[in-house]
């Protein structure tokens, strides 16, 4: 959703770092939520990706420390990529003014998504009723 906010009426940005430099000053809400989503994928604490990563770490540590090390290395790579993305988005000329180019609907939806990332990170048991029947969805795939 954050990437979708970058589509402007006259300009469509590619995902090359050279073309998205400084977009944080033009689309601050979209960039903030995009970076939050990226950090959540890395399993950053207090975000929605942390509880599953913590459970994964607990199980992997009991199975193999070698696999745990490689998973840790992969997550460090994702974290570095998240910080690099943030750095590129905030690189802009010093005198460029801050604007808010997201519509109020985009700002509301992106804000709700960011709040959802924090709620699911702090209260992962909210999803428990939905996850109990999840394996039953895959029973009929092999038939």
Image (cartoon, rainbow, N blue to C red):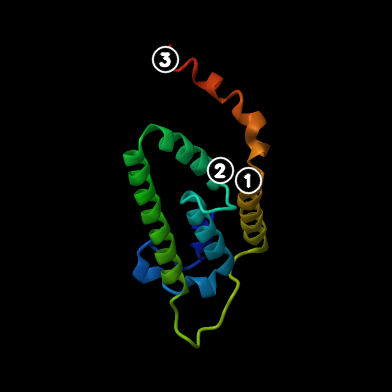
Q: Mark 2 to mark 1: distance in Å? A: 9 Å
**Mark 1 surroundings: few (<14), some (14-19) or many (≥20) residues within 10 A:** some
Q: Quick one: 131 or 71, which is closer to the camera?
A: 71
Q: Disc number at residue 142?
A: 3
Q: Is residue 107 visible?
A: yes
User: From what the image shows, is residue 45 above or below residue 31?
Assistant: above
Q: Of helix, strand and loop, which one carries label 1? A: helix
Q: Are marks 3 and 1 in contact (CB under 8 Å)?
A: no
Q: Of helix, strand and loop, which one carries label 2? A: helix
Q: Earlier in the sequence, mark 3 or mark 2?
A: 2
Image coordinates of residue 123 in percent, x first then y, are 67, 44
Q: Earlier in the sequence, mark 3 or mark 1?
A: 1
User: From what the image shows, is residue 61 above or below residue 31?
Assistant: above
Q: Mark 3 to mark 1: distance in Å? A: 32 Å
User: From what the image shows, is residue 31 above or below residue 45?
Assistant: below
Of labels 3 and 1, the one closer to you = 1
Q: Are marks 2 and 1 in contact (CB under 8 Å)?
A: yes
What number of labels is visible?
Answer: 3
**Residue at coordinates 51% horizontally, 65% vertically from top-left?**
9
Of labels 2 and 1, the one closer to you = 2
Image coordinates of residue 73 in percent, x first then y, are 35, 51
Q: Mark 3 to mark 2: distance in Å? A: 30 Å
What residue is shown with label 1? Answer: 120
Q: Is residue 12 visible?
A: no
**Residue at coordinates 58% horizontally, 70% vertically from top-left?**
101
Is 135 displayed left or right of 126 in the figure? left
**Mark 2 surroundings: few (<14), some (14-19) or many (≥20) residues within 10 A:** many
Q: Quadrant of the C terminus?
A: top left
What residue is shown with label 2? Answer: 51
Q: Disc number at residue 140?
A: none
């Amino acid at each position: 959703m954050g990437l979708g906010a970058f589509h402007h009426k006259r300009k469509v940005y590619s995902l090359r770092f050279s073309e998205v430099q400084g977009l944080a000053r033009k689309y601050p809400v979209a960039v903030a939520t995009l970076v939050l989503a990226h950090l959540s994928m890395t399993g950053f604490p207090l975000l929605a990706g942390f509880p599953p990563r913590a459970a994964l770490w607990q199980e992997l540590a009991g199975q193999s420390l070698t696999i745990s090390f490689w998973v840790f290395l992969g997550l460090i790579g994702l974290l570095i990529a998240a910080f690099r993305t943030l750095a590129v988005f905030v690189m802009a000329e010093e005198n460029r003014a801050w604007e808010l180019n997201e519509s109020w609907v985009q700002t509301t939806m992106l804000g709700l998504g960011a709040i959802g990332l924090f709620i699911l990170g702090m209260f992962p048991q909210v999803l428990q009723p939905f996850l109990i029947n999840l394996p039953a969805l895959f029973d009929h795939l092999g038939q």
